[in-house]
Image (cartoon, coloured by chain):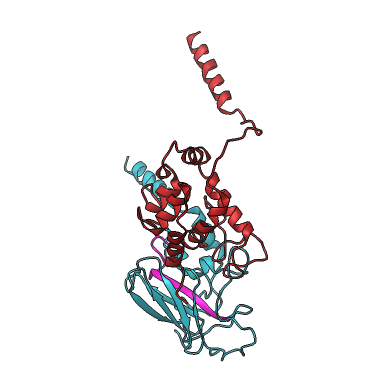
Amino acid sequence: MRSALLLLGVALLAGCANPVLDEERTALGGEAVGVPHGPTHRPGQPCTLCHAAGGGASPTFSVAGTLYQKASGKIPIEGASIDLTDALGATYHLKSNCVGTFYVEETTWTPTYPVRVQITDGTTTIKMLTQVSDEGVQPVASCSICHSDPASATSPGHLFLDRDPLIPDRAIPAQTCGRGGPGQ
Amino acid sequence: MRSARLVALVLLASTAACAIPDPTTTVHLDCPDRASFAAVSPFLEDGCGTLYCHGAPARPLRIQGFSGLRRDPSDRPGGDPTTVAEVDENYRAVCGLEPEIMSAVVAGQSLPEALLLVQKPRNETHHKAGIIVKAGDDGDTCLTSWLGGQVDGKACQRAAALWQLPP
């Protein structure tokens, strides 16, 4: 009787999994060789597929994303300020790390949606054209859920700061980034 | 014998349930006019049509435009301004959501509040995104005035502006 109940419990738990999200996580692939779990792993991927309630990874994020220099490439920007303003006027400021990634943990700041986003490096400033809305289902707060590559009619492409392709490339973050260097 | 009849009855009912609807059947649809919808569409585009909400291709009431889903594959969200073709698509999406009720509203046989188009953003019928408008505010007035045949263009402008970034 006890083992039957146990089996039923396991079956019910298995039934609660979300196969769509499971498939999306699997599609992300494995970790890059030599990059440990931490703030620099998996840049550009939708962080809250895993770093959200039920996602299996800790900590959980309320907002997360990765910033690049231009639309045409994937050179990250380190040290850019990502300024978030929620519906009640509360603000939170993030800095991108050496792989361009930024995030805020849910325990630190949970915004009231919708959220406005502005990004600046002190010279160039861009505002997101639309607001980030809470659709009520995780993992909405990953920028790359909507800002996925390649750019298309359904996506503006990855986050980038320099709209003008003629602006020279900025300094490339240190080669050691993500392998025990800055940002770790 | 009795059970045989019962089985036959169940089989008959099952067959009827599997009948294929007549593909030539049409539903009569009246909708408020397309011209005045041009005032409503910007509010829907900015307030509802973001990429993760009604700008997602799989979402019911698909909304297209500048800030979200684009109709032309060569257009990009945040690229060129909303096109007339996209406003046409938004009009069709709104009118076709509940055609019978929409027709009743236009005929004055039903109140705009009978439509999900009004209930959902108010969250009177559960809305995943929660409350987008409150009864009587600019966004709500934009929708209900259009449905009532006298669109309040200024309310629509103010409602859309709420969702747009300041210059």
Q: Which chain is cyan?
A: A
Quadrant housing residue B108: top left
Chain assigned red = B
Quarter occupied by residue A169: bottom right
- At x 57%, y 89%, the residue is A172
Please report the bounds of the magenta region as a residue range: A51-69
Going by the image, does A179 lie left or right of B72? left
In reply to whether residue A61 is colored magenta, the answer given is yes
Q: Is residue A118 above or below residue B19?
A: below
Q: Nearer the viewer, residue B113 or B39?
A: B39
Residue furthest front as drawn: B150
Looking at the rendered structure, the number of numbered marks drawn on it comes to 0
Q: Nearer the viewer, residue B133 or B146?
A: B146
Asked if residue B156 is positioned above or below residue A101 in the image, the reply reads above
**A34 drawn magenta:** no
Asked whether residue A138 appears in the rendered view, the answer is no
Residue A9, percent from left and from top:
36, 47
Q: Residue at x 64, y 30 (%)?
A: B22
Q: Is residue A144 visible?
A: yes
Picture coordinates of residue A154 (x, y %)?
A: 59, 63
Residue B64 placement (x, y as % from top left): 57, 59
Residue B29 position within the rendered picture, expressed as x and y whole percent measured from the top left: 56, 39
The residue at 49%/63% (across/down) is: B46
